[in-house]
Amino acid sequence: QVQLVESGGGLVQVGGSLRLSCVASGSIFSDNTMDWYRQAPGKARELVATITSGDSTNYADSVKGRFTISRDNAKNTVYLQMNSLKPEDTAVYYCHTKRLTGPLLYNYWGQGTQVTVSS
C-alpha cells in the first residue's frame, strides 16, 4: 500500500512561483517513478512531469522551461517547482505513482492540491 500526500498549492499571481510537495509512505520510494498530473475544470487529467528512480525527468511541452520536478529519497518526497506561472496552469495537481505487484499494476494518487493563477 502506498499513501501520497500533496501540499503547497495556493493562489498566486501571473508570473509567480509555487513549490508543490508530495510525501510518499508505505513503499520503497526510491525505486518508484513519480509523476505530477493536473486537471483543470472541464478538462481531462494530464501528465505534467515525471521523474524516474534514476532521476531522469520528462515534461509536458506546456511546462518545459518553467517547471522542475525533483525528488529527495531521504525524505520520501517529490517536488514540483513551478515558475513563471500562467492562468492556464490553474488546476488541481495530483501526485502519482504505480507499483507492479506480481501480475497486477496498481496506480496510487494523492488527494490533490489546488493551484490558482490569477491575472
Image (cartoon, rainbow, N blue to C red):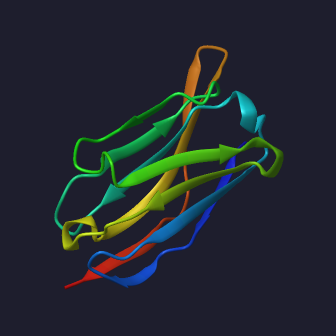
Q: Which of 55 and 30 lies nearest the eye of the viewer?
A: 55
Quarter of the image with the N terminus in it: top right
Residue found at x 41% / y 74%: 114
Residue found at x 55% / y 57%: 110
Q: Which of 35 and 119 lies nearest the eye of the viewer?
A: 119
Question: Would you say 47 lies left or right of 87 here?
Answer: right
Q: Which of 67 and 3 lies nearest the eye of the viewer?
A: 67
Residue found at x 45% / y 81%: 10
Question: Would you say 60 lies left or right of 1 here?
Answer: left
Quarter of the image with the C terminus in it: bottom left
The image quarter containing residue 7 is bottom right
Residue found at x 22% / y 52%: 44
Number of callouts in the render? 0
The percent position of residue 9, horizontal first and vertical second, equals 48, 75
Residue that extends furthest to the top in the rendered view of this protein: 103
The percent position of residue 73, horizontal first and vertical second, equals 76, 42
Question: Would you say 59 lies left or right of 31 here?
Answer: left
The image quarter containing residue 117 is bottom left
Q: Which of 1 and 14 lies nearest the eye of the viewer?
A: 14
Q: Looking at the picture, does residue 92 appear above or below residue 97?
A: below
The percent position of residue 82, horizontal first and vertical second, equals 42, 62
Question: Would you say 83 lies left or right of 27 here?
Answer: left
